[in-house]
Amino acid sequence: MNPTGARALLDRLLRRIAPEVDLTGADPRAPLQDLFDLDSMDFLNLIAAVHEETGIDVLERDYPRLTTIDGFVAYLADRTPGPSRR
Amino acid sequence: MSLVRLATRPTIHKTAWPAGVVPNVVDYEATRATFSWEAARAELTGLPGGRGLNIAHEAVDRHAAGPLADKVAFRWIERDGRRRDATYGELRAATNRFANALRALDVGKGDRVFSLLGRVPELYVTALGTLKNTSVFCPLFSAFGPEPIHQRLERGDGRVLVTTPALYRRKVAPSRDALPALEHVLLVGGDAGGIDCTLAFDELLAEVSDELVIPPTDPEDMALLHFTSGTTGTPKGAVHVHDAVVAHHATGASALDLHPDDVFWCTADPGWVTGTSYGIVAPLTHGVTSVVDEAEFDAERWYRILQDERVTVWYTAPTALRMLMRAGAELARSYDLSRLRFVASVGEPLNAEVVVWGQEALGLPVHDNWWQTETGGIMIANLAGADIRPGSMGRPLPGVEVALLRRGPDGRAVVHGGPHGTVEVIEEAGVDGELALRPGWPSMFRGYLHDDDRYAMCFAGGWYLTGDVARRDEEGWLWFVGRADDVIKSAGHLIGPFEVESVLMEHPAVVEAGVIGVPDPVAGEVVKAFVTLRAGHQPSEDLRLDLLGFARKRLGPAVAPRDIAFDQHLPRTKSGKIMRRLLKARELGWPAGDLSTLEAAS
């Protein structure tokens, strides 16, 4: 997955979990939970959705790396997607 | 409809005391027999000169004036891992300043001071400084949306609000004009550029003295206001008084087993009652050091805090424990948790698997306990010095008298001879009944603000009716069964379906909504909404997401539904009320029960 694809994935998944969030113009280095009203359950749902869509298992210890837009994109772009369930 | 919970795991016997610390309560029966609230009150000092009882004096000033003055009271761990400490002496000075700042603003006794903040030092200074000024502290959860915040500020007559520029801009400013009673908004940190009609917290405190004599405080003076949700209507503001500190202190000893040298970590946010009673008051009255994490849940971070801060007593929630469980026991075992000696949990029933997982991962079983906003403090608990029955909420604490009351067709306790008449106490074991408490413990709520009727409805036959259903086993351990009403318990917080339904019905496409809790492996229950669309609107994924975003924007993630479904035939009673219980039965595939009061769903 390239960075553009990872960013599009984040857009798509967040739209499912927190449709009110608009990432346009958001600070890519700030924690998403600060920029928008997202709680721990939302974040867990985001991680679960990543797995569901891409087959990528995000390890618990890597969760903090996915909390910003830049972090999410870098993490996903680094990984080759596994077989998609969709 | 009840989710029956039975003893699925063997009793955990205590064979040795962890770290060699003898629990405060070892002989349960004897302690109960000799306990009195009068004696518990004598553990506190009261205001000097017999001027009454003030929570902040017991929590801060009496330690600051003695050998604990230089002991760390709070250690805040910032997001980036940096620590900030405040000793009892420093906390005394900072809270004196806040009380003096309130006085300078002409805010006095009984005036409501709200906070809408993360777990930053200013929140704790606001809480305790407000109490010193004999004003009333009302915490709001920062993950609430604008709607719940507005409702609570309005209903609670908020005169002062302490918040951040970002939270203010997003959640308060748009409707400030509709809150005429809100005179002062104090902003903490951040960039307040472009915000009118507010004051800077730091500047205000810098201008006033750090010396203060706490005014005379009657133990029955209002001290804390905690909002909670009911089945119908707006949220209820449960009023607590300064005398509550007697129960905070006593239960800190009995249920949390606090000893003077403990390092204590209560993970609850002070926006909820647990984070105030046990995240602020109880550890301070015991003179221990409390750890506060300013960040949100993260498994590795939490284990690191337990290890690095050498936490000895840990009070957390089932949702957090289940999330840790998902991360695996190996992760826990890669940290040195040897200082930990007691783990307790509250918020929703703790399933037996989690209690036992604690033994594997933390080396200690988890002790579940039970209480609610109205009780102000822990009422029923598994104790450090007693066996644990995994899955049970434990036994009544010393000073607490519990009964189970026979229930009627509506799920609530049957009351004979008018609304406050007599009730039927269930004597036999193994029978579901509404959990009831004998009034008289010091932290019992003294009313719902501006709502005497709803307060009166909570009592019958000399009992306070909790709205929870439980059963008792032969030896007296209590087991949670479910709610007697439609209130949803999600991640340890109560959510009123009516609040959520009302917001959904403000959407132009929605004519009606029914909201229930559906089981969730992590949160216990999550909120699910069923909506009926107005003529001319068609169900679609886009509309579903629009509704979800609409509800989240107004209610915030803590209250908004996680899932929304379309339903043009919501089940209703003959009088037209939506039957949430039937909606739930249908959703979960339960037998529907008595349908005689239902209109046929055509």
Image: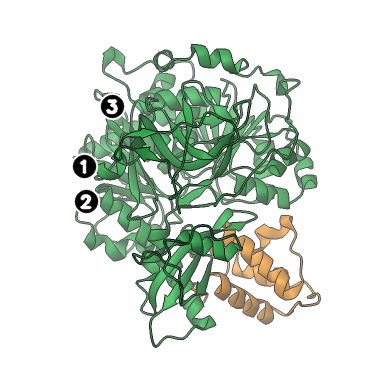
Chain colours: A orange, B green
| Residue occupied by mark 1 | B105
Residue at image location 56% in from the left, 70% down from the top: A17
Q: Disc 3 is attached to a residue of which chain?
A: B
* Count of number-bearing discs: 3
**Dot 3: what SS?**
loop
Q: Residue B183 carries which label?
A: 2
| Residue occupied by mark 3 | B220
Asked if both marks, 1 and 2, belong to the same chain, the answer given is yes
Q: Residue A66 carries which label?
A: none
Q: Distance between the residues labelled 3 and 1?
A: 25 Å
Asked if both marks, 2 and 3, belong to the same chain, the answer given is yes
Q: Disc 1 is attached to a residue of which chain?
A: B
Q: Earlier in the sequence, mark 1 or mark 2?
A: 1
Please state which of the two labelled residues, at mark 2 or mark 3, is closer to the viewer. Answer: 3
Q: How far apart are marks 2 and 3 (CA)?
A: 26 Å
Residue B241 placement: quadrant: top left
Please state which of the two labelled residues, at mark 1 or mark 2, is closer to the viewer. Answer: 2
Residue at image location 58% in from the left, 21% down from the top: B259
Query: Residue B586: percent from the left, percent from the top?
Result: 56, 65
**Dot 1: what SS?**
loop
Left or right: B135, with A27 as reference point: left
Q: Is residue A37 above or below residue A2?
A: above
Residue B248 placement: quadrant: top left
Q: Which of marks 2 and 3 is nearer the N terminus?
A: 2
Query: Residue B28: percent from the left, percent from the top?
Result: 59, 18
Residue at image location 40% in from the left, 53% down from the top: B231
Residue B408 placement: quadrant: top left
